[in-house]
Image (tube, rainbow, N blue to C red):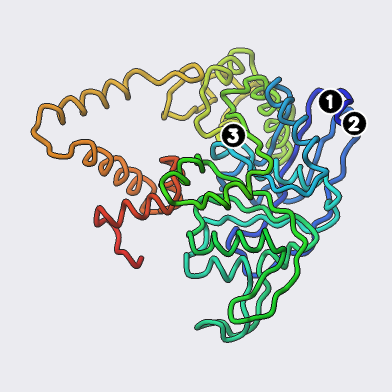
Amino acid sequence: MGPGRDLPRAEFLLLSAMMPDARADPPAAQAPPAATGDSGHLWTLPNRQALATSIRATAQVFEDPRSMELLARIRLIAPSDASVLVMGETGTGKELVARHVHALSHRAGAPFIAVNCGAFPETLVESELFGHEKGAFSGAFAAKAGWFEAANGGTLFLDEIGDLPLAVQVKLLRVLQEREVVRLGSRRTVPIDVRVVAATNVRLEEAVAAGHFREDLYYRLHVVSLDLPALRERPGDILPLARHFIAEYRQRLGYGDIRLGSEAADKLLAHPWPGNIRELENVIHHALLICRDGLIRPADLHLSSLQGGARAGEIAADPRARLEAALAAYFQEDHEHLYEHLEDVIVRAAFEYSERNQVQAARLLGISRNVLRARLIRMGAIAALK
Protein backbone atom coordinates (compact mmCIF):
# COMPACT_ATOMS: atom_id res chain seq x y z
CA MET A 1 0.00 0.00 0.00
CA GLY A 2 1.52 3.35 -1.02
CA PRO A 3 1.81 6.20 1.48
CA GLY A 4 -0.42 8.44 -0.61
CA ARG A 5 -3.52 6.31 -0.12
CA ASP A 6 -6.04 6.82 2.65
CA LEU A 7 -5.27 4.99 5.87
CA PRO A 8 -7.77 2.36 7.02
CA ARG A 9 -10.14 3.25 9.84
CA ALA A 10 -8.35 0.95 12.26
CA GLU A 11 -5.39 -1.32 12.01
CA PHE A 12 -4.55 -4.00 14.55
CA LEU A 13 -1.27 -5.73 15.07
CA LEU A 14 -1.36 -8.78 17.28
CA LEU A 15 1.87 -9.96 18.83
CA SER A 16 2.92 -13.56 18.41
CA ALA A 17 4.31 -15.62 21.23
CA MET A 18 8.07 -15.47 21.30
CA MET A 19 10.42 -17.60 23.35
CA PRO A 20 11.64 -15.86 26.53
CA ASP A 21 13.94 -12.92 25.85
CA ALA A 22 16.94 -14.84 27.17
CA ARG A 23 16.49 -17.66 24.65
CA ALA A 24 18.80 -20.64 24.40
CA ASP A 25 18.44 -21.42 20.69
CA PRO A 26 17.77 -19.22 17.65
CA PRO A 27 14.15 -19.44 16.50
CA ALA A 28 13.27 -20.48 13.01
CA ALA A 29 12.46 -17.94 10.33
CA GLN A 30 9.08 -16.40 10.94
CA ALA A 31 6.60 -16.06 8.12
CA PRO A 32 4.82 -12.72 7.85
CA PRO A 33 1.28 -12.54 9.15
CA ALA A 34 -1.61 -12.68 6.75
CA ALA A 35 -3.55 -9.47 6.29
CA THR A 36 -7.28 -9.35 5.86
CA GLY A 37 -7.20 -6.67 3.21
CA ASP A 38 -6.90 -2.91 2.96
CA SER A 39 -10.22 -2.21 4.66
CA GLY A 40 -9.15 -3.56 8.03
CA HIS A 41 -5.58 -4.88 8.09
CA LEU A 42 -6.15 -7.22 10.99
CA TRP A 43 -2.88 -8.94 11.79
CA THR A 44 -3.07 -12.17 13.77
CA LEU A 45 -0.29 -14.45 14.93
CA PRO A 46 -0.60 -17.61 17.08
CA ASN A 47 -0.13 -18.21 20.80
CA ARG A 48 -0.73 -14.75 22.23
CA GLN A 49 -1.83 -16.55 25.41
CA ALA A 50 1.85 -17.28 26.14
CA LEU A 51 2.33 -13.58 26.92
CA ALA A 52 -0.38 -13.44 29.59
CA THR A 53 2.11 -12.47 32.32
CA SER A 54 4.30 -10.24 30.16
CA ILE A 55 4.53 -6.47 30.57
CA ARG A 56 4.57 -6.10 26.80
CA ALA A 57 1.57 -4.94 24.82
CA THR A 58 -0.07 -7.73 22.83
CA ALA A 59 -2.17 -5.56 20.52
CA GLN A 60 -1.95 -2.23 18.79
CA VAL A 61 -4.65 -0.19 17.10
CA PHE A 62 -4.35 2.96 15.01
CA GLU A 63 -7.54 5.02 15.18
CA ASP A 64 -6.61 8.12 17.16
CA PRO A 65 -5.21 10.92 14.92
CA ARG A 66 -1.80 10.68 16.62
CA SER A 67 -1.70 6.94 15.98
CA MET A 68 -2.68 7.44 12.37
CA GLU A 69 0.23 9.85 11.94
CA LEU A 70 2.56 7.24 13.43
CA LEU A 71 1.20 4.55 11.12
CA ALA A 72 1.75 6.77 8.10
CA ARG A 73 5.35 7.35 9.18
CA ILE A 74 5.91 3.61 9.69
CA ARG A 75 4.72 2.95 6.15
CA LEU A 76 7.12 5.56 4.79
CA ILE A 77 10.24 4.24 6.50
CA ALA A 78 9.53 0.49 6.53
CA PRO A 79 10.63 -0.31 2.94
CA SER A 80 14.15 1.05 3.55
CA ASP A 81 17.01 -0.70 5.37
CA ALA A 82 17.65 2.24 7.70
CA SER A 83 18.13 1.55 11.40
CA VAL A 84 15.12 2.56 13.49
CA LEU A 85 14.97 3.76 17.08
CA VAL A 86 11.56 3.24 18.71
CA MET A 87 10.92 5.31 21.84
CA GLY A 88 8.01 4.98 24.22
CA GLU A 89 6.88 4.03 27.70
CA THR A 90 6.66 0.41 28.81
CA GLY A 91 3.51 -1.24 27.50
CA THR A 92 3.00 1.08 24.52
CA GLY A 93 3.74 -1.63 21.95
CA LYS A 94 7.31 -0.95 20.82
CA GLU A 95 7.87 -4.56 19.75
CA LEU A 96 4.60 -4.53 17.81
CA VAL A 97 5.77 -1.48 15.90
CA ALA A 98 9.10 -3.17 15.18
CA ARG A 99 7.24 -6.22 13.87
CA HIS A 100 5.14 -4.02 11.60
CA VAL A 101 8.24 -2.31 10.22
CA HIS A 102 9.60 -5.77 9.45
CA ALA A 103 6.34 -7.00 7.92
CA LEU A 104 6.14 -4.03 5.55
CA SER A 105 9.75 -4.36 4.40
CA HIS A 106 11.34 -6.56 1.75
CA ARG A 107 12.66 -8.68 4.65
CA ALA A 108 9.17 -9.83 5.65
CA GLY A 109 9.82 -13.45 4.69
CA ALA A 110 13.07 -13.61 6.69
CA PRO A 111 13.54 -13.97 10.46
CA PHE A 112 12.33 -11.39 12.95
CA ILE A 113 14.14 -11.90 16.26
CA ALA A 114 13.42 -9.92 19.43
CA VAL A 115 16.10 -9.66 22.11
CA ASN A 116 15.77 -7.88 25.46
CA CYS A 117 19.19 -6.36 26.11
CA GLY A 118 18.41 -6.00 29.82
CA ALA A 119 17.60 -9.67 30.28
CA PHE A 120 21.16 -10.99 30.02
CA PRO A 121 23.92 -10.87 32.65
CA GLU A 122 26.67 -8.48 31.57
CA THR A 123 29.08 -11.40 31.24
CA LEU A 124 26.87 -13.15 28.66
CA VAL A 125 25.38 -10.35 26.58
CA GLU A 126 28.31 -10.25 24.11
CA SER A 127 28.11 -14.00 23.54
CA GLU A 128 24.34 -13.86 23.06
CA LEU A 129 24.51 -11.09 20.48
CA PHE A 130 27.62 -12.06 18.54
CA GLY A 131 28.03 -15.79 19.28
CA HIS A 132 31.01 -17.79 20.55
CA GLU A 133 33.28 -20.66 19.61
CA LYS A 134 33.79 -23.83 21.60
CA GLY A 135 36.03 -23.17 24.58
CA ALA A 136 35.74 -19.38 24.30
CA PHE A 137 34.91 -19.22 28.02
CA SER A 138 34.09 -21.54 30.89
CA GLY A 139 30.94 -23.46 29.99
CA ALA A 140 31.23 -22.92 26.22
CA PHE A 141 31.10 -26.61 25.36
CA ALA A 142 30.03 -26.02 21.76
CA ALA A 143 30.10 -23.24 19.19
CA LYS A 144 26.95 -21.15 19.05
CA ALA A 145 25.69 -18.51 16.62
CA GLY A 146 24.59 -15.22 18.15
CA TRP A 147 21.38 -13.35 17.48
CA PHE A 148 22.90 -11.31 14.67
CA GLU A 149 23.71 -14.46 12.73
CA ALA A 150 20.31 -15.96 13.57
CA ALA A 151 18.59 -12.87 12.17
CA ASN A 152 20.67 -12.82 8.98
CA GLY A 153 18.57 -11.56 6.09
CA GLY A 154 15.88 -10.29 8.43
CA THR A 155 15.35 -7.89 11.32
CA LEU A 156 16.88 -7.90 14.81
CA PHE A 157 14.86 -6.04 17.44
CA LEU A 158 17.03 -4.87 20.35
CA ASP A 159 14.70 -3.90 23.18
CA GLU A 160 15.97 -1.84 26.14
CA ILE A 161 19.04 -0.85 24.14
CA GLY A 162 20.05 1.59 26.89
CA ASP A 163 20.88 -1.35 29.17
CA LEU A 164 23.83 -2.51 27.05
CA PRO A 165 27.21 -2.22 28.81
CA LEU A 166 29.57 0.32 27.25
CA ALA A 167 32.03 -2.38 26.16
CA VAL A 168 29.30 -4.15 24.21
CA GLN A 169 28.13 -0.84 22.73
CA VAL A 170 31.57 -0.45 21.12
CA LYS A 171 31.29 -3.87 19.46
CA LEU A 172 27.70 -3.24 18.40
CA LEU A 173 28.78 -0.02 16.70
CA ARG A 174 31.45 -1.91 14.78
CA VAL A 175 28.96 -4.57 13.69
CA LEU A 176 26.59 -1.92 12.40
CA GLN A 177 29.38 -0.16 10.53
CA GLU A 178 31.20 -3.19 9.07
CA ARG A 179 28.15 -5.47 8.59
CA GLU A 180 30.05 -8.41 10.05
CA VAL A 181 30.44 -10.13 13.42
CA VAL A 182 33.32 -11.89 15.13
CA ARG A 183 32.33 -14.62 17.56
CA LEU A 184 33.97 -14.74 20.97
CA GLY A 185 37.07 -16.93 20.73
CA SER A 186 37.35 -16.51 16.96
CA ARG A 187 39.29 -14.25 14.59
CA ARG A 188 37.13 -15.04 11.58
CA THR A 189 34.58 -12.46 10.49
CA VAL A 190 31.07 -13.56 9.56
CA PRO A 191 29.25 -11.30 7.06
CA ILE A 192 25.69 -10.40 8.06
CA ASP A 193 22.76 -8.68 6.42
CA VAL A 194 20.54 -7.54 9.26
CA ARG A 195 18.29 -4.54 9.80
CA VAL A 196 18.40 -3.32 13.40
CA VAL A 197 15.37 -1.84 15.12
CA ALA A 198 16.19 -0.70 18.66
CA ALA A 199 13.83 0.42 21.40
CA THR A 200 14.09 2.24 24.70
CA ASN A 201 11.80 3.60 27.39
CA VAL A 202 14.42 6.06 28.65
CA ARG A 203 15.82 9.22 27.08
CA LEU A 204 19.04 8.14 25.40
CA GLU A 205 20.11 11.77 25.00
CA GLU A 206 20.36 11.99 28.79
CA ALA A 207 22.24 8.69 28.93
CA VAL A 208 24.70 10.06 26.36
CA ALA A 209 25.16 13.26 28.38
CA ALA A 210 25.76 11.19 31.52
CA GLY A 211 28.36 9.03 29.76
CA HIS A 212 26.30 5.84 29.95
CA PHE A 213 25.58 5.53 26.23
CA ARG A 214 27.94 6.13 23.33
CA GLU A 215 27.12 9.18 21.27
CA ASP A 216 28.34 7.60 18.02
CA LEU A 217 26.15 4.55 18.58
CA TYR A 218 23.19 6.80 19.36
CA TYR A 219 23.50 8.55 16.01
CA ARG A 220 24.04 5.24 14.23
CA LEU A 221 20.77 3.87 15.63
CA HIS A 222 18.89 7.15 15.31
CA VAL A 223 18.71 7.22 11.51
CA VAL A 224 14.93 7.03 11.84
CA SER A 225 13.04 7.59 15.08
CA LEU A 226 9.51 6.56 15.96
CA ASP A 227 7.95 8.13 19.05
CA LEU A 228 5.11 6.03 20.45
CA PRO A 229 2.59 8.16 22.34
CA ALA A 230 1.43 6.84 25.68
CA LEU A 231 -2.12 5.50 25.67
CA ARG A 232 -3.34 8.55 27.63
CA GLU A 233 -2.04 10.72 24.76
CA ARG A 234 -4.14 8.90 22.14
CA PRO A 235 -7.57 8.51 23.75
CA GLY A 236 -9.16 7.59 20.42
CA ASP A 237 -7.45 4.19 20.66
CA ILE A 238 -8.72 3.29 24.15
CA LEU A 239 -12.22 2.04 23.33
CA PRO A 240 -11.24 0.22 20.09
CA LEU A 241 -8.53 -1.58 22.06
CA ALA A 242 -10.96 -2.34 24.89
CA ARG A 243 -13.47 -3.84 22.45
CA HIS A 244 -10.72 -5.89 20.85
CA PHE A 245 -9.64 -7.30 24.23
CA ILE A 246 -13.29 -8.02 25.13
CA ALA A 247 -13.66 -10.06 21.94
CA GLU A 248 -10.28 -11.74 22.49
CA TYR A 249 -10.91 -12.83 26.09
CA ARG A 250 -14.59 -13.62 25.49
CA GLN A 251 -13.51 -16.15 22.88
CA ARG A 252 -10.65 -17.45 25.02
CA LEU A 253 -12.94 -17.93 28.04
CA GLY A 254 -15.79 -19.39 25.99
CA TYR A 255 -18.26 -16.66 26.98
CA GLY A 256 -21.23 -15.38 25.01
CA ASP A 257 -21.73 -11.78 23.89
CA ILE A 258 -20.42 -9.18 26.34
CA ARG A 259 -21.00 -5.44 26.00
CA LEU A 260 -19.13 -2.48 27.40
CA GLY A 261 -21.58 -0.17 29.17
CA SER A 262 -21.49 3.54 28.42
CA GLU A 263 -20.55 4.47 32.00
CA ALA A 264 -17.79 1.86 31.97
CA ALA A 265 -16.54 3.30 28.69
CA ASP A 266 -16.43 6.76 30.29
CA LYS A 267 -14.42 5.34 33.17
CA LEU A 268 -11.91 3.84 30.75
CA LEU A 269 -11.54 7.16 28.95
CA ALA A 270 -11.00 9.01 32.25
CA HIS A 271 -8.13 6.79 33.42
CA PRO A 272 -4.53 7.94 32.70
CA TRP A 273 -3.27 4.38 31.98
CA PRO A 274 0.20 4.49 33.55
CA GLY A 275 0.68 0.88 32.38
CA ASN A 276 -0.54 1.71 28.87
CA ILE A 277 -1.95 -1.03 26.59
CA ARG A 278 -0.86 -3.89 28.81
CA GLU A 279 -2.72 -2.39 31.76
CA LEU A 280 -5.85 -1.97 29.65
CA GLU A 281 -5.69 -5.60 28.59
CA ASN A 282 -5.41 -6.78 32.19
CA VAL A 283 -8.31 -4.56 33.28
CA ILE A 284 -10.56 -5.97 30.54
CA HIS A 285 -9.52 -9.55 31.31
CA HIS A 286 -10.45 -9.07 34.96
CA ALA A 287 -13.71 -7.34 34.07
CA LEU A 288 -14.83 -10.30 31.96
CA LEU A 289 -14.18 -12.65 34.85
CA ILE A 290 -16.48 -10.79 37.26
CA CYS A 291 -19.10 -9.03 35.10
CA ARG A 292 -22.73 -10.23 35.14
CA ASP A 293 -25.51 -10.43 32.55
CA GLY A 294 -23.14 -9.86 29.64
CA LEU A 295 -22.51 -6.22 30.57
CA ILE A 296 -19.30 -4.60 31.84
CA ARG A 297 -20.18 -1.95 34.42
CA PRO A 298 -17.92 0.66 36.08
CA ALA A 299 -17.65 -1.47 39.23
CA ASP A 300 -16.16 -4.30 37.12
CA LEU A 301 -13.20 -2.13 36.10
CA HIS A 302 -10.46 -2.37 38.72
CA LEU A 303 -8.10 0.43 37.70
CA SER A 304 -4.57 1.06 38.86
CA SER A 305 -4.24 2.88 42.17
CA LEU A 306 -1.03 4.55 40.99
CA GLN A 307 -3.02 7.48 39.67
CA GLY A 308 -6.57 6.58 40.71
CA GLY A 309 -9.31 7.52 38.30
CA ALA A 310 -7.81 10.91 37.47
CA ARG A 311 -8.08 12.50 34.08
CA ALA A 312 -5.17 12.02 31.70
CA GLY A 313 -2.10 13.83 32.91
CA GLU A 314 -3.53 14.58 36.37
CA ILE A 315 -1.93 13.37 39.59
CA ALA A 316 -4.16 12.09 42.33
CA ALA A 317 -4.29 14.64 45.14
CA ASP A 318 -3.88 12.36 48.14
CA PRO A 319 -0.58 10.64 47.16
CA ARG A 320 0.95 14.00 46.26
CA ALA A 321 -0.21 15.53 49.52
CA ARG A 322 1.31 12.62 51.44
CA LEU A 323 4.59 13.02 49.57
CA GLU A 324 4.71 16.76 50.22
CA ALA A 325 4.03 16.15 53.92
CA ALA A 326 6.90 13.66 54.06
CA LEU A 327 9.21 16.12 52.33
CA ALA A 328 8.19 18.85 54.77
CA ALA A 329 9.25 16.57 57.63
CA TYR A 330 12.66 16.13 55.97
CA PHE A 331 13.01 19.88 55.50
CA GLN A 332 12.47 20.46 59.22
CA GLU A 333 15.39 18.18 60.04
CA ASP A 334 19.05 19.06 59.60
CA HIS A 335 20.06 16.76 56.73
CA GLU A 336 23.37 17.21 54.96
CA HIS A 337 23.25 16.56 51.22
CA LEU A 338 19.46 16.31 51.38
CA TYR A 339 18.97 16.10 47.62
CA GLU A 340 21.28 13.06 47.29
CA HIS A 341 19.64 11.50 50.33
CA LEU A 342 16.18 11.84 48.78
CA GLU A 343 17.44 10.37 45.50
CA ASP A 344 18.83 7.40 47.45
CA VAL A 345 15.48 6.94 49.19
CA ILE A 346 13.64 6.90 45.84
CA VAL A 347 16.10 4.49 44.23
CA ARG A 348 16.08 2.15 47.21
CA ALA A 349 12.27 2.21 47.42
CA ALA A 350 11.95 1.37 43.72
CA PHE A 351 14.53 -1.41 44.07
CA GLU A 352 12.69 -3.01 47.00
CA TYR A 353 9.27 -2.46 45.39
CA SER A 354 10.57 -4.38 42.34
CA GLU A 355 11.71 -7.21 44.65
CA ARG A 356 15.36 -6.25 44.04
CA ASN A 357 15.03 -6.76 40.30
CA GLN A 358 17.33 -4.18 38.69
CA VAL A 359 15.69 -4.26 35.27
CA GLN A 360 12.19 -3.72 36.67
CA ALA A 361 13.37 -1.00 39.07
CA ALA A 362 15.12 0.84 36.24
CA ARG A 363 11.95 0.68 34.14
CA LEU A 364 9.90 1.96 37.06
CA LEU A 365 12.22 4.96 37.47
CA GLY A 366 12.64 5.59 33.75
CA ILE A 367 16.43 5.21 33.82
CA SER A 368 18.80 2.65 32.33
CA ARG A 369 19.87 -0.40 34.29
CA ASN A 370 23.49 0.76 34.18
CA VAL A 371 22.59 4.08 35.84
CA LEU A 372 20.53 2.28 38.50
CA ARG A 373 23.26 -0.29 39.15
CA ALA A 374 25.93 2.40 39.60
CA ARG A 375 23.68 4.19 42.10
CA LEU A 376 22.93 1.00 44.04
CA ILE A 377 26.65 0.19 44.25
CA ARG A 378 27.43 3.71 45.48
CA MET A 379 24.68 3.36 48.09
CA GLY A 380 26.02 -0.04 49.15
CA ALA A 381 22.71 -1.72 48.30
CA ILE A 382 24.46 -4.29 46.10
CA ALA A 383 28.01 -5.54 45.73
CA ALA A 384 30.12 -4.12 42.91
CA LEU A 385 30.56 -7.55 41.30
CA LYS A 386 26.91 -8.60 41.51
Mark 2 → mark 3, Cα distance in angstroms: 34 Å
* Residue that label 2 marks: 38
Q: Are the two marked residues, 1 and 2, in contact with CB atoms closer than 8 angstroms?
A: yes
100 vs 366, left or right, is right
Can you say which quadrant of the picture contains the N terminus?
Answer: top right
Residue ID at (24%, 41%): 340
Amino acid type at mark 2: Asp
Q: Nearer the viewer, residue 160 or 207?
A: 207
Amino acid type at mark 3: Leu
* Residue that label 3 marks: 289
Q: Are the two marked residues, 2 and 3, in contact with CB atoms closer than 8 angstroms?
A: no
Q: Which mark is residue 338?
A: none
Residue 76 placement (x, y as % from top left) = 80, 35
Crowd tier of the residue under label 2, counting other residues whose Cα lies within 10 Å: few below 14, some 14–19, many 20 or above: few
* Residue that label 1 marks: 8
Counting residues from the start of the chain, the first of labels 1 and 3 encountered is 1
Counting residues from the start of the chain, the first of labels 1 and 2 encountered is 1
Mark 1 → mark 2, Cα distance in angstroms: 7 Å
Q: On screen, 108 above or below 100?
A: below
Counting residues from the start of the chain, the first of labels 2 and 3 encountered is 2
